[in-house]
Image: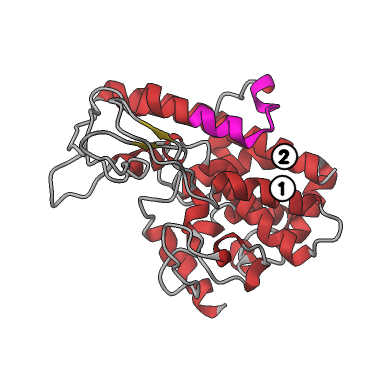
Amino acid sequence: MKNLSVVIGVFFLTVSSAFGWNSFGHMTVAAIAYDHLAPTVRTKVNALLKLNPLYKNWVTNVPSQDRPKVAFIMAATWPDIIKKMDSGYQNDGNRPNGPEAARNIGYADKLMHRYWHYIDMPFSPDGTPLINPETPNAKTQIAMFRDTLKDPHATDELKSYDLVWLLHLVGDVHQPLHATSRFDTDQPNGDNGGNLVTLCAKPCKNELHAFWDGVLGTSVRPTDASKRAKKLKAANSHLAAVSDEAIWINESLQAAKDVVYVSPVGVGEGPFTLDASYKTRAREVSEKRVALAGLRLANLLNEVFK
């Protein structure tokens, strides 16, 4: 795992545009969740995270009393870290291809599984025919990983792998553009969750998905994420109690319709220039989605490890 140990530093310097919240967003979700875990559950997840190949990197130079939470926060970024070059993981594409796409074999699996990070729930503002999402996807994997963590016969190594994926995917599906693809006459095959909607003229490469990934901030420090988590308004407890990932995804789809794909974002690929009002609303919605994701992640883990 030498290459992967090196690439962790490179990753935080080159956060990509298709990650579903950037590292700061994912770490903030995890920080909220950790603060709401039952003590016995913290003990269990702490032990499982020690089996991750990057655990020692996460806790190097971290005071011993802070290591469990820092490792938990950092673990939420692991499924993005393995998508970087020289990580030792194979890029098997952005679309599922073959039986290996849905396998669950733990850290022996060296596929990046990029298609696990999202589900392209389709919609169209102009009646363009829709294409249903492919499987496996974020929805199928959240369900699979939850079941594995409940399974008394699953190995700790497998549960460790599934845990870090869950920490990440629960955050992913609360990002509106990781739960949808818009179809219109200009983009009849969909816009890939806003990745094909530009915010500036070429050769500039800014696009809508990247904007929403990074709207909360860009810090890569777990301490900053922990501080931000404490400042966010707590999510509604009744909404946080919703445990069905299909509902989480439908919420994000609706948010995409109501908040993402609105003026000044029009149909087609753009470019569109985001104004201050749009950016303010995006930040407000993102804060609510992250706060909700954190509590739901805590509730999920408290349930499977009770």
Label 2 neighbourhood size at 10 Å, few (<14), some (14-19), many (20+)? Answer: many
Q: Secondary structure at mark 2?
A: helix
Along the line of sight, the residue nearer the viewer: 5 or 205: 205
In the image, farthest residue toward the front: 129
Query: Does residue 157 appear in this view?
Result: yes
Q: Amino acid at mark 2?
A: Leu
Q: Secondary structure at mark 1?
A: helix
The answer to whether residue 77 is above or below residue 233 is below
Q: Amino acid at mark 1?
A: Arg
What residue is rendered at 53% in x and 40% in y?
A: 173
Can you give x and y, in whole percent of width and height, for residue 292 in the image?
Answer: 59, 30
Asked where in the image residue 159 lies, by quadrant, the reply is bottom right
247 magenta-colored? yes
Q: CA distance from mark 1 to mark 2?
A: 8 Å
Asked where in the image residue 193 lies, by quadrant, the reply is top left
Q: Quadrant of the N terminus?
A: bottom right
54 magenta-colored? no
Q: Which residue is mark 1?
A: 146
The answer to whether residue 233 is above or below residue 294 is above
Q: On the picture, is 159 further left or further right than 137? A: right
Q: Which mark is residue 300?
A: 2
| Residues marked 1 and 2 touching at CB (< 8 Å) | yes
- State which region is magenta: 238-252
Query: Does residue 224 appear in this view?
Result: no
Can you give x and y, in whole percent of width and height, for residue 256 in the image?
Answer: 40, 29
